[in-house]
Each structure stands twice: as structure tokens, then as C-alpha cells.
């Protein structure tokens, strides 16, 4: 049996992409793989699909600052806004 046909674990992976239109926030969840680790190509493809879906609906991917502040609010209950070092854009942009 080919190695790529073997199930390698009892897990499913998905990616959650955070989006905004500047006023409203949302999430797009894309399935990546079932019982195998996703490749970088799988991740890039999922991000591209999420970006296209967001743009088709008047949204865009969150900037680094927007994402960080959303995580601080969701996970820690923060009410203030925080700045992010290094500017507002992501260090690497695999979805162009």
C-alpha cells in the first residue's frame, strides 16, 4: 500500500481564518486533512479559498493588529486595544 494512502492518526485538521470588513468580524473555517498532516500547499490553498470567499462577501483577511486584538478580546477578555510591533502587515503573505 502506498504510504500516502495510509491513515496516520485519529484526527482531522482545519484552519480558521479571521476576517473583517472594518466594522464587523467573522471567521471562515476550511477543512485541511483527515488523518494525515496537511502540507504547506494544503494550508496555502485553504487560505486562498478563505480570502476569495471573504472578498466575495465584502470582507478581507484581518491585519496583524486586528487579529491580535481579536485574540486578546476572545481569549483574555481584554477591553483595551494593543499595538503590535513591526507594522500592521503579516511577515509572510502566502496568499498574495
Image: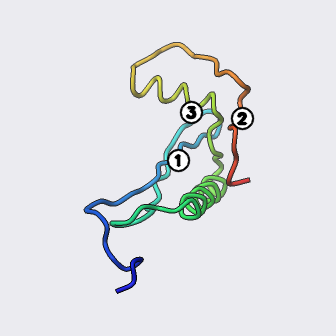
Please tell me which of labels 1 and 3 falls first in the chain: 1
Taking the image as shown, residue 56 lies to the left or right of residue 42, namely: right
Q: Identify whether 25 is placed above or below 43.
A: above
Please tell me which of labels 2 and 1 falls first in the chain: 1
Q: Are marks 2 and 1 in contact (CB under 8 Å)?
A: no
Q: Disc number at residue 74?
A: none
> Given the current orientation, which residue lies at the most extreme top position?
80
Position in image of residue 85 (x %, y %): 68, 21
Secondary structure, mark 2, is: loop
Taking the image as shown, residue 65 lies to the left or right of residue 32, namely: right
| Residue 62 position by quadrant | top right
Residue drawn 63% across and 54% down? Answer: 51
Secondary structure, mark 3, is: helix
Q: Which residue is mark 1?
A: 17
Position in image of residue 24 (x %, y %): 56, 36
Color encoding of the figure = rainbow
Taking the image as shown, residue 44 lies to the left or right of residue 74, namely: right
Q: Residues within 10 Å of mark 1 (few under 14, many from 20)?
A: some
Q: Which residue is mark 2?
A: 89
Instruction: Quote the CA–CA distance across marks 2 and 1.
Output: 15 Å
Position in image of residue 5 (x %, y %): 37, 80
Please tell me which of labels 3 and 2 falls first in the chain: 3
Q: Which residue is mark 3?
A: 67
| Residue 48 position by quadrant | bottom right
Secondary structure, mark 1, is: strand
Q: Residues within 10 Å of mark 2 (few under 14, many from 20)?
A: few
Q: Identify whether 57 is placed above or below 91.
A: below
Q: Are marks 3 and 2 in contact (CB under 8 Å)?
A: no
Instruction: Quote the CA–CA distance across marks 1 and 3.
Output: 10 Å
Amino acid at each position: 500500500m502506498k504510504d500516502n494512502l495510509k491513515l496516520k492518526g485519529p484526527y482531522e485538521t482545519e484552519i480558521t481564518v479571521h476576517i473583517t470588513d472594518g466594522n464587523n468580524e467573522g471567521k471562515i473555517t476550511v477543512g485541511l486533512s483527515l488523518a494525515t498532516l496537511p502540507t504547506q500547499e494544503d494550508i496555502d490553498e485553504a487560505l486562498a479559498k478563505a480570502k476569495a470567499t471573504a472578498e466575495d462577501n465584502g470582507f478581507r483577511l484581518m491585519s496583524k493588529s486586528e487579529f491580535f486584538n481579536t485574540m486578546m478580546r476572545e481569549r483574555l477578555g481584554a477591553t483595551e486595544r494593543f499595538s503590535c510591533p513591526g507594522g500592521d502587515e503579516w511577515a509572510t503573505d502566502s496568499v498574495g
